[in-house]
Amino acid sequence: MRAFDGAASAPVRHGCAMLVQSDRSVPEPGAVMRKIVLMMSMSLDGYIEGPDREIDWHLVDDELHQHFNDVLKEMGAFLNGRVTYELMAGFWPTADADPHRSGPMIEYARIWRNMPKVVFSRTLEHADWHTTVVRDVVVDDILALKAQDGGDLALGGAALAAEFLRLNLVDEFRVYVHPILVGRGQRLFPDSDALTALRLIDSRRFGNGVVLLHYERPGAADR
């Protein structure tokens, strides 16, 4: 997926159709599809943040941060909700200007700044740094976005992830389990009556005790 012609900001749209490189909103049968990858950190008891939205318990050292960089730099775009985007935009655009930042932080600042981003929000009116704002998650537009050339699409944010899960749009799960029990707060996965089988692709233990569990939906490569 190409960047948005170098634009610093983009107009608001109701769907993602303006990212598609043709007039079709649905990919042709048999087209090779990029994957939507949910990539999130959570506590052992399933929370991504505490009751006051605190995430200071996330254990991100240089080893884990470099791993994030290695995965994310191969992505084609970041898909986020407004809250996640605004948190990132408030820090990362200039983080590499501080010489005291670690090497992985400096590298990630450049990855984030240059990566195409799609923010799903009904209230955000403007976004910079190669970012497009869209109002709704439209299935046909997401499928067309997946059919474009480029890397996979990194999905972040619990509320947005819940909508993608509801619409059966998540292909892979990269869940980073931190060695802590938070007790209450924002859960990663919403309640659901659906039973979803997954296939384990990989797992990895990091030196700080964080464990990556990497799953995919069976048949995701064919969707």
Image: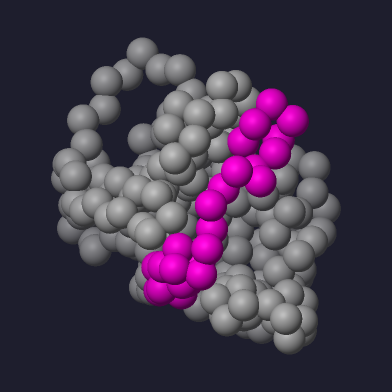
Residue 164 visible in rendering: no
Say which residue appears at 69% left-offset and 26% top-offset: 51
Q: Is 118 a magenta residue?
A: no
Do we see residue 31 in this rendering?
yes
Q: How is the image coloured?
A: one colour
- At 45% across and 27% down in the image, what residue appears? 45
Look at the picture and state if 181 lies above or below 213.
Answer: above
What is the magenta range? Answer: 49-77
Q: Looking at the image, which is closer to me, 39 or 17?
A: 39
Residue 18 at x, y percent in the picture:
59, 63
> Where is 157 relative to 19, above or below?
above
Compare residues 30 and 154 and report the one nearer the observer: 154
Name the residue located 45 percent from the left edge and 17 percent from the top edge.
191
Name which residue lies at 28% across and 55% down: 204
Left or right of 61 in this view: 32: left
Q: Is residue 90 left or right of residue 4?
A: right
